[in-house]
């Protein structure tokens, strides 16, 4: 792609998200989301591959539906209250419609069917943008609206996402689909705790973005898109194989890695709120996600390639800007647990 066009699209992507962050008027927020959607579509379709075209079409139709529903909810609220401000939402119908529209935008259960199919049709770099940056604008709206939304709906969407995200990822062989279901499960944790402790939801979102970025960059460096292809990583690059292992375990939420922190804090907060049954269900459902993370760990570190590889192992990768980002995100994915009190003060 032309560097000038690419720069323009990336700037538009940032502009759309920034407008949504700053806006308090429904039309301004809707405009930011639309700019965000239209800016990523050329990035998705530039491969000129039938799978990429199919994924882009599905993504466009899904996001257009969610945007139309969001605009309808804002218009209904303005008609009821006479106010276009995002915080002046007194209509329960509008609140429910907005919750469903944002759930469709980020891919929560039961509006999650588009996410694995879309992610499967993209390359790893565009899939990284879709899994991380594209979640920021809808979450910015949710963080402004959480006191006005129905906590029971949020809880139901969150628990269903944790269960379905773990369950559907069990028998997948494509890494991008596994990462999509991992994303759905992590979003379920954020949505569940959003009404009770938004600071924990923000902390979880930050760590999710760091860990997902690290994993996408690792798979991109290893040039792997299927489970079978990562079985050769230990032979080709033992260091990247070790980093993949620790990042996957961190995503699974095992101590003493960074991914354990948000799950531990969320379960602790839910216990304080006397939500013992939902907390138990989510803790057990996490075992489903942990199973396919451990399956990937087994393929990365404990499986040898069926064909002999005659190339030498590389303990040192080429020094590029991407590897610097990979180093930073992987380090943060592994070593943040001792800094939990400091992070809680920052996100308070």
Image: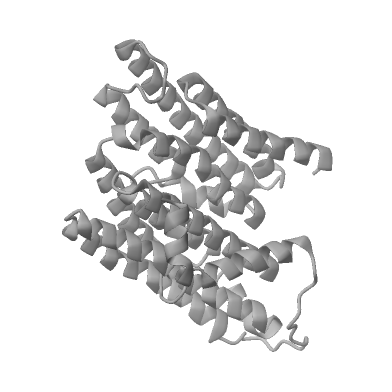
Q: In the rendered image of this protein, does residue 98 appear above or below residue 211? A: above
Residue 23: percent from the left, percent from the top? Answer: 52, 26
Looking at the rendering, which quadrant does residue 306 occupy?
bottom right
Residue plotted at (53% across, 87% down):
302
On the rendered structure, is 172 left or right of 48?
A: left
Residue 328: percent from the left, percent from the top? Answer: 64, 65
- Camera-nearest residue between 30 and 334: 334
Residue plotted at (41% across, 66% down):
261
Q: In the rendered image of this protein, does residue 133 appear above or below residue 177? A: above
Q: In the rendered image of this protein, does residue 344 appear above or below residue 303? A: above
Q: In the rendered image of this protein, does residue 47 appear above or below residue 73? A: below
Residue 223: tell me if it is visible: no
Residue 28: percent from the left, percent from the top? Answer: 53, 22
Residue 89: tell me if it is visible: yes
For the N terminus, the image quarter is: top right
On the rendered structure, is 282 left or right of 101?
A: left
Looking at the rendering, which quadrant does residue 236 occupy?
bottom right
On the rendered structure, is 93 left or right of 343?
A: left
- Camera-nearest residue between 328 and 167: 328
Looking at the rendered structure, the number of numbered marks drawn on it comes to 0
Residue plotted at (76% across, 79% down):
316
On the rendered structure, is 179 left or right of 327?
A: left
Residue 297: percent from the left, percent from the top? Answer: 50, 78
């Amino acid at each position: 792609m032309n560097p000038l066009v690419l720069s323009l699209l990336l700037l538009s992507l940032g502009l759309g998200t920034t407008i949504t962050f700053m806006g308090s008027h429904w039309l301004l927020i809707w405009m930011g989301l639309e700019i965000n959607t239209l800016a990523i579509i050329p990035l998705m379709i530039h491969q000129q591959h039938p799978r990429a075209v199919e994924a882009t079409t599905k993504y466009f139709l899904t996001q257009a539906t969610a945007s139309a529903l969001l605009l309808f909810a804002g218009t209904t609220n303005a008609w009821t209250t006479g106010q276009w401000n995002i915080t002046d939402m007194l209509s329960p119908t509008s609140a429910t419609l907005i919750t469903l529209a944002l759930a469709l935008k980020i891919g929560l259960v039961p509006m999650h069917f588009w996410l694995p199919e879309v992610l499967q049709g993209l390359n790893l770099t565009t899939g990284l943008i879709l899994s991380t940056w594209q979640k920021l604008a809808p979450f910015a709206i949710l963080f402004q609206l959480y006191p006005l939304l129905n906590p029971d709906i949020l809880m139901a969407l969150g628990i269903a996402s944790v269960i379905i995200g773990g369950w559907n990822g069990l028998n997948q062989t494509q890494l991008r689909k596994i990462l999509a279901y991992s994303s759905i499960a992590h979003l379920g944790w954020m949505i569940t705790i959003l009404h009770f402790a938004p600071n924990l939801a923000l902390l979880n979102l930050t760590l999710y973005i760091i860990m997902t970025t690290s994993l996408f960059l690792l798979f991109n460096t290893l040039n792997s898109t299927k489970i079978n292809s990562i079985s050769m990583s230990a032979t080709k690059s033992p260091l990247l194989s070790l980093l993949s292992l620790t990042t996957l375990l961190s995503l699974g939420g095992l101590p003493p890695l960074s991914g354990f922190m948000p799950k531990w804090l969320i379960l602790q907060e839910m216990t304080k709120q006397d939500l013992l049954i939902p907390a138990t269900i989510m803790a057990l459902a996490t075992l489903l996600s942990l199973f396919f993370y451990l399956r990937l760990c087994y393929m990365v570190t404990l499986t040898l390639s069926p064909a002999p590889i005659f190339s030498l192992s590389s303990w040192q990768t080429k020094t590029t800007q991407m590897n610097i980002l990979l180093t930073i995100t992987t380090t943060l994915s592994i070593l943040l647990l001792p800094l939990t009190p400091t992070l809680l003060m920052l996100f308070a």
